[in-house]
Amino acid sequence: MISVSEARKLIDENCKGGRSEVMRLIDALDRALSDDVVSPMDTPPFHQSAVDGYAFSFKDWDGKSKLEVAGEVQAGNVFTAEIKPRQAIRIFTGAPVPAGLDTVVMQEKIEVQGDQMTIKDPLLVAGANVRLQGSQTKIGDVVLKKSHRLTPASISFLASLGITEVPVFAHPHIRIIVTGKELVAPGGTIKEGQIFESNSFALKTALKAMGISPVSAEIVEDDEVLIMEAITRALDSDIVILTGGASVGLYDLVPSSLAKCGVKEIFHKVKQKPGKPFYFGTYGDVLVFALPGNPAAVLSCFYEYITPAIGKFTGRQYHKRLKMILAHDFQRKPGLTQFMKGKTKANTVFILDHQESYLMNSFAHADALVELEEDREVILKGDLVNVLMILF
């Protein structure tokens, strides 16, 4: 049985990382860039008015004389006529500033009589209200770096550069196998000795919250042949997640089935609670995780181990690890690292009741997992504890 830190290290060492794919920009929300993005143009692409007003040459104005309004230019148009000294052009926000002009006075700061304009802005300086060409980006600039997570703002930014496709890390192909003869799909009728299956719901929705959909999720009975057939079907993916049958009981058939399917065991059993029978193996570059069947153990192991592995594929960190102040005294039996359902408030965290691995009522209210190291027995109010935030 290995430690939690050893388990994390072995998973990280065996995760080869992700593939790159090109996506339409409009579809790439929340994806991480797999390469730097370079600007194909200057932005703004020309000297541009920042306001509605009047453009003129500051050096040709004596600070008091009227200027003649010689025409106008709207956004999307270009003023090509000759502009003489002491002439101004009516200009609108976003329009290109005509050649030879360098300053724009806001329309609220002028008086116009006929074609004569008087500037009423004593604070006006040369270059005012003009966005210079390339002042945001210049052609060839790296505008977003590899691993940048694409947000609505960054997608808008790239669209403004005329970019329509971006290189991103591909999502891994994930297959889920839930084992258990006692399981019945919600909506059915349970008989004595049966329970409703919920682990596939937990895993599929946890993945959905990360923007990932599993390729498949199937339920199989505790039968080695059926389990091996399901495993064989799943090994064409990047990640296989099994729940149930991972311990050492008579009907815990998953580890032996994995071995018979050619999966190399990296470790089986971790000094932790819940999820001590947690298994990790590989089949070539395929990562295989086998989790205990208890629902709280499934989600705890998923958040603590599988989510970071998925992040190696997608270039993302999904859940933050923090140090927070424990809001109350807590004592427990040492010997195993314990992942405890917690609820945060400001910079403090409360450890919830009902921590057993089969209980989900406290997990339904939790927004964090509190990690208590294996030798930590008494934690006092005000002590710092390691916290994994599990809600986005």
Image (spheres, grey):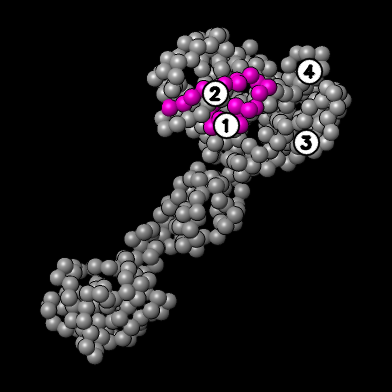
Q: Which residue is mark 3?
A: 186
State which region is magenta.
348-369
Q: Is residue 382 above or below residue 122?
A: above
- Cα–Cα span, label 4 and label 1: 31 Å
Query: In the rendered image, which quarter contains the N terminus?
Result: top right
* Residue 267 placement (x, y as % from top left): 66, 18
Taking 326 as reference, is 294 left or right? right
Dot 2: element: loop
Which labelled disc corresponds to residue 352?
2
Q: Are marks 2 and 4 in contact (CB under 8 Å)?
A: no
Q: Which residue type does callout 2 highlight?
A: Leu
Residue 336, quarter of picture: top right
Q: What residue type is disc 3 on?
A: Pro
Q: CA distance from mark 2 to mark 4?
A: 30 Å
Q: Which residue is mark 4?
A: 252
Looking at marks 3 and 4 on the same chain, the residue that comes earlier in the sequence is marked by 3
The residue shown at (83%, 36%) is 188
Q: Amino acid at mark 1?
A: His
Name the residue that disc number 1 marks: 365
Characterize the local packing of mark 4: few (<14), some (14-19) or many (20 or more) Cα atoms within 10 angstroms.
Answer: some
Q: Is residue 269 magenta?
A: no
The reply to whether residue 84 is visible in this rendering is no
Foreground pick, 210 / 317: 210
301 to the left or right of 117 = right
* Residue lying at 42% horizontally and 21% vertically, measured from the top left: 384
